[in-house]
Amino acid sequence: MKKAIFVFVFLSIHLWTAAVSAQSLADRVVEKTLSNGLTLLMVERHQAPTISFQITYKVGSVNEHSGITGVAHLYEHMAFKGTERLGTSDYQKEKPLLATLEELNREITQEEAKGPKADPARLTALRAEFGALEKEGVKWVVSNELGELYDRNGAVGFNASTGRDVTSYVVSLPANRLPLWMAIESDRMAHTVLREFYKEREVVLEERRRSVETNPGGKLYEAFLSATFTAHPYGYPTLGWPSDVRSLSATETERFFKTYYAPNNTVVAMVGDFKPAEVIPMLEKYFGSIPAGPPAPRVVTAEPPQSGERRVEVEDDANPQVIVGYHKPALDHPDDPVFDVIDSLLSLGRTSRLHKKLVEEKKIAIGAGSNSGTPGVRYPNLFTVSATPRAPHTTVEAEEAIYAELERLKNEPPTQKELEKVITNLNADLVRSLRSNSGLASQLAYFQAVAGDWRYVLRNRDQIEKVTGEDVMRVAREYFTKKNRTVATLVKVPSPEEPEGKALPISKEAGR
């Protein structure tokens, strides 16, 4: 018993100390805006001779429109192809070849647009010329020179990601390679060359085939978001619609790059073994000379309120799943911290409500969870709950069990013990996310980009601590309504050997 008390006290002291340490970030983060508008966030940590870097652009698939969906993700691929100095053996000879390829692509596109009136012979000739020129261009390409240069200099975690709200490029390096990082990344920001564009476009289409078209869960999620967002671009897939990706050109992609990837739309976070006062002049030298762009266009389209429940089904030879989503405000709304509390109550850990009820007690699901920011957070988004039934139970049963837990939130306030557990878990998650240099750099850059201030990560913790049981019931009653929800179900298609009568139910009116 004494040991249990000691462990509890030790854990409480550890979390309290960690929370205080996290709060002290406000005194440790050095902020600087360069002359071209680029935002720098820097934190000294001298425990190891390394630095973690995160470059976050305030652009994602939410900034796309019909016809160019997937362009942000495709540009992320192209950013690894090099610059006028990297990735090529002779850019002056490569440049006119790339221009000719683009002109040929334009002619092919124009001829294809004629439909039945297109000239087959002309198309055949143009495509043959295009293919021959692509092969010729390979001799100027130095494949993966960027990655190999980083590898030779001790890089770890060199990667990138594109989401709905932001695009991020990350790497960690020995501290004495700081000048190398500045030279490479300022060059990428200013002089990326879209070489091997059409080859990489096919790579992206293959990625989409793997992660969506042949992936039942990916197909379900894509159909769910499309049904939920009928106007707002959160409904577009980050990988893009196949027809859009297939028609993207290097010219269109470069135009998108020049619109959104300017320094004044960028956050750079650095955490590690350096002194900000010494590196700021170097950063100004490398990055400050890159011209600022005009303010990035705002996303003005708002999703209209739903006028009734929406349901969508995806058929596949796979285990059934169900996703339930409710529209909710963006992260700057006063109710957003309440959704964070509800998310923790429902699905954080093995003692969470969904796991206890659906997985352990009723044993109708092999897994269940929730998310308070689907698929992004900068704009009004979704609170989602999902479950995978345990055979022979059905998605109908899982859906009914989800609604029962949401009804409980409306009528029964969480106990003080549950709310305290939320804060304890939040503190633990915050500590884990800030412990490593790369984790801290990621948090700083992300929240600076989506919330306009990295301090959101600390303010949100304080706001969550103020959430009451009455807040939880009020928000649940206001948002978790049938009229405000969309339900997507993955329906298992009977195999040829399985009699039709044994197929799982396709749908059933459920909920309140």
Image (spheres, rainbow, N blue to C red):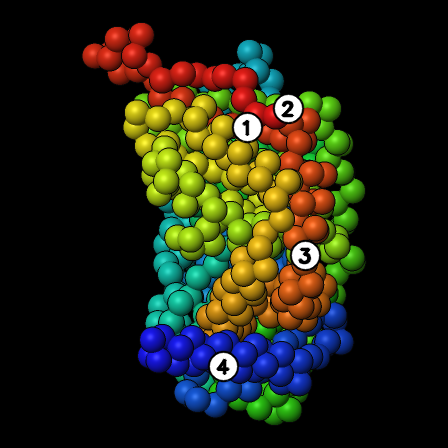
Q: Amino acid at mark 2?
A: Glu
> To which residue does mark 2 refer?
309
User: In this rendering, would 98 be left or right of 213?
Assistant: right
Tell me the quarter of the picture where residue 289 sits. bottom right
Disc 2 crowd rating (10 Å Cα; few below 14, some 14-19, many 20+) is some
Q: Callout 4, which amino acid?
A: Ile
Q: Tell me the residue that label 1 is attached to.
A: 487
Q: Which residue is mark 4?
A: 13
Q: Residue 192 in the image: x percent, y percent?
A: 55, 60
Which residue is nearer to you in this view: 498 or 32? Answer: 498
Q: Residue at x 29, y 12 (%)?
A: 502
- For this orientation, the residue located farthest to the front is 1
Mark 1 or 4, nearer chain start: 4
Closer to the chain start, of discs 3 and 2, is: 2
Tag 1 near tag 3, CB within 8 Å? no
Pair 1/4: label in front? 4
Q: Residue at x 57, y 91 (%)?
A: 275
Q: Marks 1 and 2: CB-CB under 8 Å?
A: yes
